Amino acid sequence: MAVKNLRRLRRGERRQQTDSGFPSTPTDVVEAVPIDDNDPLFTFLLATGGPIEVERINLESPALSEIRAQGVQLIVPLIAQGDLIGTLNLGRRLSDQPYSTDDRKLLAGLAGQVAPAIRVAQLVRQQEAEAKERERIDQELRVASLIQQTLLPKELPRLTGWDIEAYYQSARAVGGDFYDFIPLSGDRIGLVIGDVTDKGVPAALVMATTRTTLRGVAAHTDDPGEVLFRANNSLIPEIPPAMFVTCLYGVLNTETGELVYANAGHNLPYVRTASGVTELRARGMPLGLLPDMNYEVLTARVELGETMLLTSDGIVEAHSTDGEMFGFPRLQKLVAGHEGGPDLISAILDELHRFQGFDSEQEDDVTMVTVRRLSSALESATAFGDEPSSIARFTFPSASGNERKAMDAVADVAQGLGFAGERLERLKTAVSEATMNAIEHGNKGDPALLVEIDLLANAQKLLVRIRDQGGGKPIGAPVVPDIEAKLAGEQSPRGWGLFLIEQMVDAMRTSVDGHHHVIELEMSRGGN
Amino acid sequence: MPGTPFSATVRHEDGGSVIDLVGDIDRNAGDGLTAAYQEATLGRDQGSPVVLSFRDVDYINSTGIAVIVTLLAKARADGRSLRAWGLSPHYQEIFQITRLADFMTLFETEPQALAVS
């Protein structure tokens, strides 16, 4: 490693110390003569190690000829750590006397001291240059990443009946991935996903140009084929010859689910339907290569409950440590196995990280957009945002038996959110137990006091908050009942409630203030 | 949608006694269950098991679990085997979580519950 650097430096800097002997006669200073690595003089001086008269050297050497022509009489090699880092070239002495043994000793001693000092100076300069280069690259990456982040949508479109999610992670080198949502007239929205060949600032700039061009063109025509046709022609003069842009453009009617699309050589979108995963194929050349290209326009329909996935090639072209490619079949399988939205995105990322190995650096940008048509109005009311929003509220007087009414009321709402089977049963048991707790312990069975039940949901989870009018004394942490002690009559046979609740739900939280207890039950909406 | 009132009816079979449970099992089931157990074991020797049939039970809450624990404690004091069949998958899970199933063997069918000596 060190040797390689030294050699590169030697070639790059062509360093040679030259001196005529007396600084007071600067007119005698001669030009430095570079000595190439493979010049025989190089090896000769390294082997000689000390001052040597030019006339005693008998070599076929381009550098030596030049040195001779300059009238150099004595060469003093500067050697540090076994490497020739330069020479002192001396001409005739002003006295015209040959160099004495003492002169040569003095020069050899001088060379022995100067060479390491020069070497250190060289290393310092080299490190400074490398640090500067690293800084320059980092700066460029920051600029590229800034351009990209500035131009990617800040917010996802919120469309009734649809759940649109996007994920973007740049590689260290920052590729040219982009996606965009273009609001159009009526119930329509333009969907864009694209990828610029090349990386760094040039790719980011082309991405910016492409995005602006597409937005401009899409405002004037409804036909995706026409949009790509015009964008291609406008981009050709703007894009450097070695670069091009793959891009899919689709116009989605959010009322009917109809998607009209055209594709400029981008990865095919997948649609997860009830009967399997389909690809949306449409032919077309990437943008920026050839003028007047035509783009095939096709129509598909995204039905209720179906999900479309748009990706960049950073996913399918990712490599495992064995050099295997992630590939389309693996991606298609993931689409088939997940409903869409954040679930699908995190499943793809998990699989991608497993495949690549968790320690390896991401090769290319990874971009995903999922467009899911929700299967019910209730679902669309709860699909947006991270904060669960209120979807139902019930109150019950504190009378024995009302826990079953509460259980059935919550179950009805939960079924509308997709809860079924064993998980619905678990939720019912938890709600019944928590409500019974509120009726009997919090409200002491006083029918004048109400148990309040709030249901909140988002796309991921359902929260059920059950509140009584007790308060003051905190609800204790659930303990695992000791059934042996209970069977032996050493403990009350009761005391199962909190333990059961905690076992039934994904999470249980209790809180208390001066006037109320709240038990919050959390159930994830996946995994029925 | 209030619950179904609890009832417990005893049948004497060759392999043991069966208590047919109907309706909700909560604290209100305690007296009926105790009475049924007494009827089921009357005149049967200690080796004759008592089988609880949960086929017609849709709801069991924590107070019902306490009732079953009380009954199980009594059966153990008597040295008598208490068994169960007909639980839904959900309540089978609850019997596992509460470890009731460690002290009361669960069976898929009534003949299986009666066949084991």
Image (tube, coloured by chain):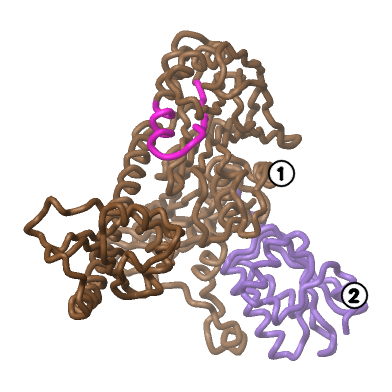
Chain colours: A brown, B purple
The kind of secondary structure element at disc 1 is helix
Q: Quadrant of residue A514?
A: bottom left
Task: State whether residue B23 is above or below residue A365.
Answer: below
Assess disc 2: are there few (<14), some (14-19) or many (≥20) residues with their C-alpha within 10 Å of its C-alpha.
Answer: few
Is A218 displayed left or right of A122 in the figure? right
Residue most toward the right?
A: B14
Disc 1 or disc 2, which is closer to the eye? 1
Q: Position of residue A390 (x, y in %)?
A: 42, 41
Say what amino acid the circle numbered 1 marks.
Answer: Pro
**Residue A202 among magenta residues:** yes
Quadrant of image for the N terminus of chain A: bottom left
Q: Nearer the viewer, residue A294 or A396?
A: A294
Residue A155 — which label?
none
Q: Is residue B58 left or right of residue A141?
A: right
- For the image, the number of numbered tags is 2
Can residue A394 be seen by looking at this rendering? no
State which region is magenta: A190-208
Q: Hey, what amino acid is under mark 2?
A: Glu
**Nearer to us in this view, B97 or B114:** B97
Q: Please identify the residue farthest to the left as the structure is shown.
A: A24
Q: Which residue, as the protein is rendered here, is positioned at the far top?
A: A220
Which residue in the structure is indicated by mark 1? Answer: A329
The answer for how far apart the CA atoms under marks 1 and 2 are is 60 Å
- Mark linked to residue B13: 2
Pick the residue in front: A14 or A259.
A14
Callout 1: few (<14), some (14-19), or many (20+) C-alpha neighbours within 10 Å? Answer: few
Q: Nearer the viewer, residue B55 or A243?
A: A243
**Disc 2, SS:** loop
* Badges 1 and 2, same chain: no
At which x and y percent is residue B45?
A: 84, 89
